[in-house]
C-alpha cells in the first residue's frame, strides 16, 4: 500500500485511516447510536490487520469512551498504528458539551490516560472555538510538542485566517476538514493554502456519514435511532436526502465497473485531490472495514473523475 508524508512530519500515512467517531457509542450530543465495544475493537483490529497505519479519535467522541476503546484495541494489535486525537470540546458532569482552548494541557493528559499511551502522534485542536482563544490554545499545543508529550500538532475545521494566526506561533503539521462531493467548501481557498504552506490534509466524512456508501436508503434514515445525530443532520433531510441518494446510485454505477461500492468511489474522489494526504473512514464492525478498505488502493481514472465532475455540475 502506498503511503504519503503528512505535512512537515516524519509520518508516512496509508491512504485511509480508521475514524473512531462512531465507536464512541450513544448517550452524547453527536452520537451515532448504541455501539458494541467488542465490535469496535474487532473493527480496529481488522483495519490494522489490513495494513492501515493510523487511527483518528477525539476526546469528545463518546465523552472519552472512544479513546478508551482505542486504548483497549491498541493492546491487542501486533503493529502499533499512529494515534491521532483532538482537544477543545469538553463536557461537564451533566454530559453537556462546551468548548474551550484554555485547558489544552489538562485535556492532553486525560487523553494519554484514556488511550494508555506515552505520547500522542498527532494532537489537533478540534474546533477554533472560542475564536479569541486560538493563540492561547495553539501556544499550549506548541509547548506540549516541545515537551515531547505530543509529536506533531495540527488543527481541524480551521479557515485560512485562523491557520495564519496559528502559524505565527508554531508550524501546523496538518488540517482535518470535512471534504466530500456534498461538501466542497475547502476547494476554493483552504486546499490551495495547505498545498502552498506544506500543511497535510486528512479529510473527514468523505462518505458523508454513510450517505454515499450505497447502503443508505430512505427507510434506513427513517429508522435511525433517536440518539443518532444523523436524524437531524441537514444532508439526511429532504430535499438533500433524495439528491444525495441519487448521487450514491450514480457512484454505484461507476463502482460496478470495477466491482467496487459507491462508498469506495466516494472516498477515491477525495483522494484524487493532490492536496489531500489521506482520508478518514469509520467502521463500526470488521465487516464495515472490509467493505470500505478497497478505497486504500482504488483510484479513479481521469475520465471517471471528469464524469463525476460533470454529474456534480449538473446536479448542484
Image (spheres, helix red, strand yellow):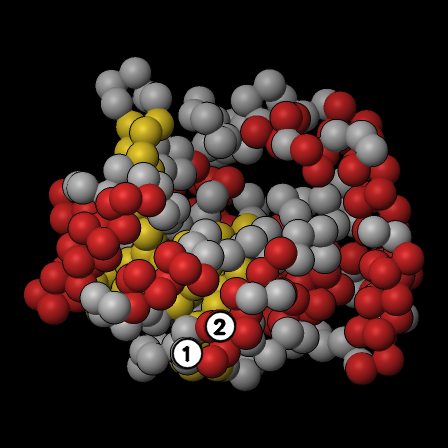
Residue 69, image x, y percentages = 35, 43
Q: To which residue does mark 2 refer?
A: 193
Can you say which quadrant of the picture contains the N terminus? bottom right
In the displayed structure image, the side of residue 123 where residue 18 appears, left or right? right
Q: Quadrant of residue 259?
A: bottom right
Q: Residue 166 lies in what quarter of the image?
A: bottom left
x 43%, y 25%: residue: 28
Residue 295 pos. (x, y %): 66, 68
Q: Is residue 172 above or below residue 95?
A: below
Tell me which corner region of the image, top left, top right, bottom left or bottom right, holds residue 267.
bottom right
Q: Is residue 261 positioned above or below 87 on the image?
A: below
Foreground pick, 297 / 93: 93
Look at the image and tell me whether residue 46 can be seen.
Answer: no
Kindly report the distance in space between the C-alpha atoms of the residues bearing marks 2 and 1. 6 Å
On the image, the x and y values in percent for residue 196 come to 47, 80
Q: Which residue is mark 1?
A: 197
In terms of secondary structure, where does tag 1 sit?
Answer: loop
Q: Residue 89: x percent and y percent?
A: 33, 38
The local secondary structure at tag 2 comes to helix
Circles 2 and 1, Cβ within 8 Å, touching? The answer is yes
Amino acid at each position: 500500500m502506498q503511503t504519503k508524508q503528512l505535512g512537515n512530519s516524519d509520518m508516512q500515512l496509508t491512504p485511509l485511516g480508521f475514524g473512531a467517531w462512531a465507536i464512541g457509542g450513544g448517550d452524547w450530543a453527536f452520537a451515532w447510536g448504541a455501539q458494541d465495544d467488542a465490535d469496535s475493537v474487532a473493527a480496529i483490529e481488522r483495519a490494522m490487520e489490513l495494513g492501515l497505519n493510523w487511527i483518528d479519535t477525539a476526546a469528545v467522541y463518546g465523552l472519552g469512551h472512544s479513546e478508551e476503546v482505542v486504548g483497549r484495541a491498541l493492546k491487542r494489535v501486533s503493529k502499533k498504528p499512529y494515534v491521532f486525537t483532538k482537544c477543545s470540546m469538553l463536557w461537564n458532569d451533566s454530559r453537556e458539551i462546551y468548548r474551550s482552548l484554555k485547558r489544552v494541557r489538562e485535556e492532553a493528559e486525560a487523553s494519554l490516560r484514556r488511550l494508555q499511551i506515552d505520547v500522542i502522534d498527532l494532537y489537533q485542536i478540534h474546533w477554533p472555538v472560542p475564536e479569541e482563544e486560538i493563540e492561547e490554545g495553539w501556544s499550549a499545543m506548541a509547548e506540549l510538542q516541545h515537551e515531547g508529550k505530543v509529536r506533531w500538532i495540527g488543527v481541524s475545521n480551521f479557515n485560512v485566517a485562523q491557520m495564519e494566526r496559528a502559524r505565527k506561533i508554531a508550524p501546523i503539521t496538518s488540517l482535518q476538514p470535512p471534504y466530500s462531493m456534498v461538501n466542497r467548501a475547502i476547494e476554493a481557498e483552504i486546499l490551495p493554502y495547505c498545498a502552498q504552506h506544506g500543511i497535510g490534509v486528512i479529510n473527514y466524512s468523505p462518505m458523508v456519514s454513510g450517505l454515499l456508501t450505497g447502503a443508505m436508503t430512505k427507510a434506513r434514515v427513517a429508522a435511525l435511532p433517536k440518539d443518532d445525530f444523523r436524524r437531524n443532520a441537514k444532508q439526511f433531510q429532504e430535499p438533500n436526502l433524495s439528491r444525495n441518494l441519487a448521487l450514491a446510485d450514480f457512484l454505484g454505477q461507476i463502482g460496478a465497473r470495477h466491482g467496487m461500492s459507491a462508498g469506495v468511489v466516494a472516498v477515491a474522489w477525495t483522494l484524487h485531490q493532490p492536496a489531500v494526504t489521506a482520508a478518514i473512514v469509520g467502521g463500526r464492525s470488521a465487516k464495515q472495514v472490509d467493505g470500505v478498505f478497497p478505497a486504500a488502493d482504488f483510484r479513479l481514472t481521469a475520465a471517471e473523475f471528469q464524469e463525476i465532475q460533470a454529474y456534480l455540475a449538473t446536479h448542484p
